[in-house]
Amino acid sequence: MSETAPGPAPAPSLVMTQLLGGFQVSQALYVVTKLGICTMLEDGPLSVGDLAERSGAKPQPLSRLIRTLAMLGLFRTDGELVETTPLGAPALPDAPGDARECGRDVDGDALRPVR
């Protein structure tokens, strides 16, 4: 078994930014899980407009949400078309390592004690 040397450590400011944005990422994941976006993409790419229509979401906010999660590797976009990546696969029904239930648990009620 070969070992690879660790890469350079990320800058502390980058790590802090990632930590501070963690709540927003978990909320974004909650929303796409609640709307069933990955499930809608199970049969192939769809446009943001189609996803908005099928989910009842507003197209512009959904587009921003998808772009944000695409930067994190959950979705791949090509113009208006969106598809799920292997990282998004656990959000599909019957997927090994189904993460949908975990995503649904990250809602506002879980955060009330800290507000």
Image: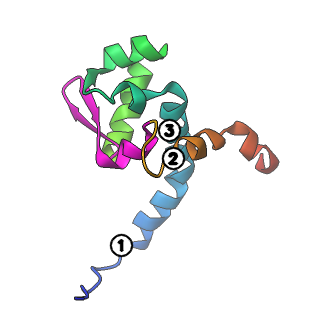
The quarter of the rendered structure image containing the C terminus is: top right
The magenta stretch is 72-92
In reply to whether residue 84 is colored magenta, the answer given is: yes
Is residue 74 shown left or right of residue 109? left
SS under mark 2: loop
Amino acid type for the residue under numbered disc 3: Ala
Q: Position of residue 52 (x, y in %)?
A: 41, 16
Q: Residue furthest left?
A: 78
Please tell me which of labels 3 and 1 falls first in the chain: 1
Label 3 neighbourhood size at 10 Å, few (<14), some (14-19), many (20+)?
A: some
Q: Name which residue lies at 38% across and 41% down.
A: 69
Please tell me which of labels 3 and 2 falls first in the chain: 3
Between marks 1 and 2 in the image, the one whose residue lies nearer the viewer: 2
In reply to whether residue 87 is colored magenta, the answer given is: yes
Is residue 99 shown left or right of residue 10? right
Could you tell me how many numbered marks the image carries? 3
| 106 shown above or below 34 | below
The quarter of the rendered structure image containing the N terminus is: bottom left
In contact (CB < 8 Å): disc 3 and disc 1: no
Between marks 3 and 1 in the image, the one whose residue lies nearer the viewer: 3
Residue 58 seen: no
Residue for badge 1: 10
Amino acid type for the residue under numbered disc 2: Ala
Amino acid type for the residue under numbered disc 1: Pro
Quadrant assignment, res 20: bottom right
Residue for badge 2: 99
Q: Position of residue 53 (x, y in %)?
A: 41, 11
SS under mark 1: loop
| 41 shown above or below 26 | above
Q: Name which residue lies at 81% across and 48% down.
A: 113
